[in-house]
Amino acid sequence: MANIHILITMGCGIVATFLLFFLFHLAIKLSGRFSATLTILLVWSIYFPLAYFYWPGIDVFAIHFSFFSMTAYGLGIVTYRKEAVTDADKANAGWFHWAPATIVCFFLILTIVDSNIIAFAMKYAPGIVAHDFRKKSGQFNEYLDRVEIQKQRGWQVSGGWDKAPELNVKEPIEMTVLDKQSQPIDGATVTAKLLSTTEPDQDYQIELVGTSAGVYKANATLNRPGRWTVVVTIARGDDVHEIKGSVDVGREFRGN
C-alpha cells in the first residue's frame, strides 16, 4: 500500500465512504448521524488492518484517518440539517445549508493539496520521507528513548565541512566529540551516513578516523546537487550517540 499513489488510496476511500453513507441513509433509511457513525466505524475497520500490515508512515496514515472520518462526519452534518427542518420551515428553508457544505468542501480541497505535497515528497525527496517521517510507532518510541538518553549523557558533538562542499569534489569532513565535562572522547567508532534527498540510491556511509584528541576526520564526495542529510553516529562501548544535520550542494558551474 505504501507504493500506491496516495491520491488513489484517498480517492477510493472517500468514494467508499460516500457509497456506504448513502447506503445506510437512503437504502436502509437510517438517520444521518447514525449513518455517519456506522460509516466511520466500517471504514476504520477496513483501513486500520490494511495500515497495520502495509504501514504507509504516520503522516500518510494520519491524513487518511482524518479525511475518511471528516467525509462521513460532513455528510452527517448536511443530512441532519434536512432531518431537523420541520414542515413549517420547509417553505422558508431548504434542507441544504452552505455552512456545513463549505466545511466539507474545504477539507476535500485540503485533502487534495496535502496528498499532492506528500506524494511529491515521496517521489522527489524520498530521503526525507524515508529517514524522518515513515518510522513505525515502535521505532519512533525507541527513537524518543534514545534522545532522552543522549540528553542525559551530555556528549558534545560538533563539526562538519570547513566550507560548503562542492559537487563531485572530495573534501574533508571533521567532527569533534567531547563528553559531558568537555573532555575529548577517544577510541570511538564514528560513522557518517550521507543521505541524498533527491536520489536515495546515492546514499552511502563513511567511517571517520581519529586524528587527534576527540577529533575524527574523513573525506566525502557529494555527487548530486541539492540537500543532503548527514547522520553522524558515535559508538564507544555500550554508548551510542547520534546527531543529524544537513548540507546544500550547488550545481557545477559550466562556462561558455
Image: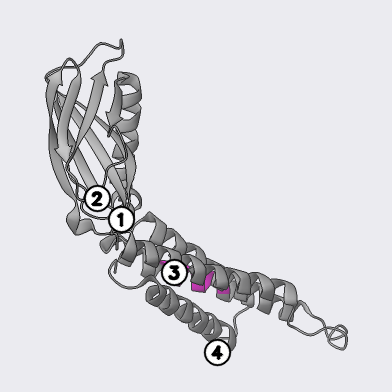
Assess disc 1: are there few (<14), some (14-19) or many (≥20) residues with their C-alpha within 10 Å of its C-alpha: few
**Badges 2 and 1: C-beta atoms under 8 Å apart?**
yes
Instruction: Say if 165 sits above or below 178 in the image.
Output: below
Q: Earlier in the sequence, mark 3 or mark 4?
A: 4
Snapshot quadrant of residue 210: top left
Q: Secondary structure at mark 2?
A: loop
Q: Cα distance, mark 2 to mark 1?
A: 6 Å
Q: Secondary structure at mark 1?
A: loop
Left or right: residue 174 compared with residue 39: left
Q: Which residues are magenta?
A: 36-44
Instruction: Say if 94 sits above or below 228 in the image.
Output: below
Name the residue: 48% across, 65% down: 114
Residue to which mark 2 is pinned:
167
Snapshot quadrant of residue 108: bottom right
Residue to which mark 1 is pinned:
251
Residue to which mark 4 is pinned:
27
Q: Position of residue 71 (x, y in %)?
A: 55, 72
Q: Earlier in the sequence, mark 2 or mark 4?
A: 4
Name the residue: 67% across, 79% down: 79
Assess disc 4: are there few (<14), some (14-19) or many (≥20) residues with their C-alpha within 10 Å of its C-alpha: few
Between disc 4 and disc 1, the foreground one is 1
Residue to which mark 3 is pinned:
116
Instruction: Say if 160 sits above or below 151 in the image.
Output: below
